[in-house]
Image: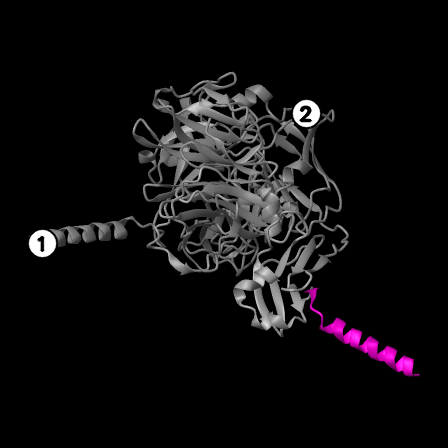
Amino acid sequence: MMLSVLARGVLAACLLLFIQSPAVRFDSARNLFLLENWTGAGQLPADRYRDIFQISVDAPDVPAMLGQYRVEGGALVFAPQFPVQPGVKYRAVARIPGSTPITALIDIPKAVVKPTTVVERIYPSTNVLPENQLKFYIHFSAPMARGFGYEHIVLRDQDGAVVEVPFLELTEELWDPEGRRFTLFFDPGRIKRGLVSQQQLGISLQEGRRYTLSIDKGWKDAQGNPLLADFQKVFTVGPADRQPIDLRAWTVREPAAGTRNPVTLVFPEPLDHAILQRDLDVMDASGAVVNGGVTIGPEEKSWVFTPDVAWKQGPHTIRLGTAIADLAGNMINRPFEIDVFDKIDEDLLHSKYVFPFTVK
Amino acid sequence: MTMFRLTICALLALMLFATVGVAADLTDSLKLGKADMKSVGVLTFGPDGVLFAGDSMGGQIFAIDTQDRTASTATAVEVMGLTGKIAAMLGTTADQIAVNDIAVNPASKKTYVSVSRGIGVNAAPVIVRIDTTGKLEALSLDNVKYASVVLPNPVNASTGGRGGNARLQAITDLAFVDNRVFVAGLSNEEFSSTLRAIPFPFSSVDKGTNVEIWHGSHNQFETNSPIRTFLPYKVNGEQTILASYTCTPLVKVPVASLKAGSKVMGTTIAEFGAGNTPLDMIAYSKGGKNFILMSNTSRGVMKFSADGLETFSPITKQVPDKAGVPYETIATLTNIMQMDQFDSQRAVVLDRTGDLRTVALP
């Protein structure tokens, strides 16, 4: 009985000693590293915090992590500037004067997440492209990681041979603000006539042949997870398009007054999907902007505008921006390349165009 | 008399310094606050320790007072595994950051590195400063003297930008020339050449003008194309922009011709070959001669003479491989990702393995 009481006392003393010993831990809920149970923390001058409590990634010869120190509830606290990274191991070392350093290795587990992100679609949506096709837009279902795009894209011809360096590879990568749309330009040096690139490597796409643009599922999303599946777009190549957009070939389907039926512009060839969404406006007879929503029709061959409120009778105009382009980058009355023997007036390059229609 | 002379001298000196102080300091227009960058990419230094930084995600250009003006005579900097060290400093691993650009403060010789911490669109912008002993520190953006200007990015008036504006401009290069910040960009939608000239100090009313630069070509076509990198340089005494393109490496354009709303014809003076994109250019003198060093994605680092650039005839017809200004490829400089001038005899380079070091200009 006596022994048992003694043993309990020793155990309690040890426990007390253990509880009161300085200890290092990571508070995952608050993203904080803490040095606790050290009574010296409160008296420590702020410029000594960093000497006493050092936090770094667990790797040789690396600088300390960026963050702020403070004393909170008697504990010396380090708040890293950025949240800790799942899958990374951290080293927190407390060097209390006169004591053996306390080292804690903190492993932040990486959650296993099932891939869910997919390539939703690629524009142009048509499967017949001109030989001088300028770009693709690849749309994803969720935000993607930056900096790894080109290694997951391959273009093959109908024999399965890889087309060498067909695209302009930019370290910046061209994404939309949400990180869900990737712009993939063909190498312009192989599209434009007379350049060394085209002479050495040839054009990327050849008329009459079939190609497959493949996106492999190794492309990671912003969460670091791969895509759910590979994606392929198969297309055939038609003749090069070097003609400027000719507005005379466009038609308009006019809506009726008092309805919210859309006004629809119809073009004989597919136009650039992204630019169609942002570079046209509708104005009423007084020149006031008509508010509404835009959708793009099948194969990007029409532009459909639905007003927020019912149309008023009278003349209207669709104001066309200068960026509107076809699949080969030809613009309104302005081809992608201008033949110097067929000079285009400078004023024409900056002209604004309007397309009139009447609401009856 | 002596006293009078001294007083006059003192007054003259005071007036001189006062004039210099008012007129010459680039930081005067900068205000203290939080530089709210959405991203940080291209960097370049102006005078007085002012760092210009491109924020492609935010569509903005920032001018930041680094308060880093102490001149240094250091001749080298070396940080092996810089990318890994920066990643560790940001609490992560090298595959979770992107090093976007480097710029050396010509006075202090400190190297500034623009970094994205993270791989998604919400990656945090960080500027890391490295002194010549190799010590790293983060440049605080929370409480700095800065100014910024938003680049125009008009939205459809009818939709009022509902659903967001998907157009973004990747800012590919910046330079400070004659109190103007020149900005080259590449849109994620239209394929065109825009060089924007923004007066500095930045003003809310004058956000500068876009100049569309065309280059006469190759066969018989005129074309325009996004500028990838450019270098302000005096050709035969005339301030010129030497612009490297995504398709045609070198075009010269006199700065005097860059007037708003005009179609400017640049002169193609060199084609450096296929399958290549230029990255950075620096100009230097050696042995009484002037040179330009250009780093590239796949054709290594090229050196060519900058003397007599005005004497090269414009390339107006198709060339078999390379043409115009002759160049040599520097065999000792390989896998260079980023490059900037360190001093008159050296450059700082960051290679693909993540090592930062000074190299002698060839």
Q: Answer above or below: position of B281 versus A102.
A: above
Q: Which quadrant holds residue A326?
A: top right
SS under mark 2: loop
- Residue A25 is covered by the magenta coloring: yes
Label 2, label 1: how far apart the Cα atoms are: 91 Å
Viewer can see residue A80: no
**Disc 2 crowd, CA 10 A, few/some/many (<14, 14-19, 20+):** some
Q: Classify the position of the N terminus of chain A by image quarter.
A: bottom right
Count of numbered badges drawn on the protein: 2
- Residue B177 is covered by the magenta coloring: no
Colouring method of the image: one colour
Residue A345 at x, y = what percent?
A: 37, 31
Considering depth in this image, is A199 or B127 the residue closer to the camera?
B127
Q: Answer above or below: position of A8 versus B13.
A: below
Q: Which quadrant holds residue A139?
A: top right
Viewer can see residue B71: yes
SS under mark 1: helix
Residue A90 at x, y = what percent?
A: 68, 55
Residue B343 at x, y = what percent?
A: 42, 36
Q: Residue extending furthest bottom?
A: A1
Q: Answer above or below: position of A253 versus A340.
A: below
* Marks 2,1: beta carbons within 8 A: no
- The boundaries of the magenta stretch are A1-26
Q: Which residue is mark 1?
A: B4
Name the amino acid type tagged 1.
Answer: Phe
Our reading of the magenta stretch's main secondary structure is helix
Judging from the image, mark 1 belongs to the subunit labelled: B
Q: Is residue A22 left or right of residue B273?
A: right
Q: Residue extending furthest top?
A: B320
Q: Which residue is mark 2?
A: A209
